[in-house]
Image (cartoon, helix red, strand yellow):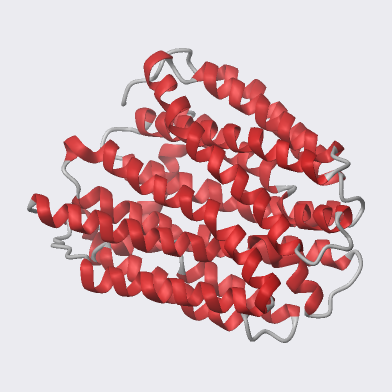
Amino acid sequence: MTTKRWKRNLWATWVAELLAIMGFSSSFPIWSYYIQELGVEGDAVAKWSGLIISAASLTMGLMGPIWGSLSDRYGRKVMVIRAMFGGAVTIGLMGFAQRVEHMLILRLVQGAFTGTVAAATTLVASSTPRERLGETLGKLQLAIFLGQSVGPITGGFVSDMLGYRATFWMTAIYLIVAGLLMLFFVNEEFTPVEHTTQGSFIQRMRQDMAMLFAGSLLGLVLGLRFALRLGLRISSPLLPLVVQEMLPASALLGSASGLLTTVSGIFSAIASPILGRWGDRHGGRTPLTIATFVLAGAIGIQALASAYWMLLVAQVFLGLAIGGTLSIISAYIGRCAPEGKAGTAYGLDTLATSLSNAVGPTTGGWLGAVSLNLPFYVGCVVTAVSGFAVFKLPKDNVQTA
């Protein structure tokens, strides 16, 4: 592939992914409020918030390995386009929902047919020269962070100005534009590798899971990924409700909730390359330990917060910690993956992340029905315990197996 072509593919995918993540994250601040608009009241709001947020992650985790296998056989570009247009249809329909059950069904379908981050990462990695891979994937990660930072505040603003339903229609427009960019500006020359077409899907999955549960360091690292994400996501459905409790008379609840997510996203973008570089040079265990306990502390601050400004301060530290844990654990996975199995390792990482995204909000929703602060205390404890597990990692960077 010529230099001009792979660079054009990168930047088209970069813009498309920025739009997609802006769209997906724009609804984060308003889930609890939209559920109330659909007629849910009282303690049921927290439970339904957890279920609906978790639903897409559950089906995305289940379908991720299947879409990954199909991309190896039929190409990466078609998988990105499928995820973009699939998201546009399902999220656009959410704006027409009349009952909370409609939202649950649509979220399940959304998870099954989307997954733009994994699809775009695979496409970019497969078309980039090996000597430029780290730099290029770093640029793509920047698009994801920017989308996560800008999306919630724009979504909150649109919901305050035009209503909650308009936020979902805006997301559908973002995803349609993103899909068209992929369709017309990305040129993939794809030829499947012979071994990807051999054997059944079940046989390949059995081999991959055997690799994971063989007592390897990779299993520990993926376990840490799951636990840290779980500790964070347990409290995620409740943060908008905490804002609502602190600012009961505000007409800008969507914007206030969106600002919290934007702040954490900005500081994640700042911390990720800095702590990742520290881990590359001096070993990942020390910065990962620090980031993990900072994350636990930030979640604890939210549990104790009595004013909105305290939530904003907590998001600064939360973002720094998330950026550090994300980059360092991703580097660990790449280094300890068995030779020739890096794609499988990152696929299992996606599965671990999706499972934690499914379990965490559901658990938090049920805990939140007891007390809004309880999920934050539980998330703090889960994250702190995970910090002690980090000490089992080798002090120096592991080498590729």
Observer-nearest residue: 181 or 52? 181
Name the spot of residue 201 as percent of width and height, x first: 35, 60
Q: Is residue 350 left or right of residue 193?
A: right
- Residue at 64% x, 56% y is 358
Can residue 213 be seen in the rendering of this structure?
no
Observer-nearest residue: 92 or 337? 92
- Residue at 60% x, 59% y is 152
Examine the rendered structure and indicate whether residue 66 appears above or below residue 110.
Answer: above
Examine the rendered structure and indicate whether residue 272 appears above or below residue 348.
Answer: above
Observer-nearest residue: 206 or 170? 170
Where's the C terminus, which quadrant? Answer: top left
Examine the rendered structure and indicate whether residue 219 appears above or below residue 149.
Answer: above
Examine the rendered structure and indicate whether residue 386 appears above or below residue 311.
Answer: above
Observer-nearest residue: 153 or 66? 153
- Residue at 85% x, 43% y is 307
Name the spot of residue 354 as percent of width and height, x first: 55, 53
Can residue 66 be seen in the rendering of this structure?
yes
Residue 105 occupies which quadrant of the picture? bottom right
Name the spot of residue 391 as percent of width and height, x first: 59, 17
Q: Is residue 226 left or right of residue 142?
A: right
Residue 199 occupies which quadrant of the picture? bottom left
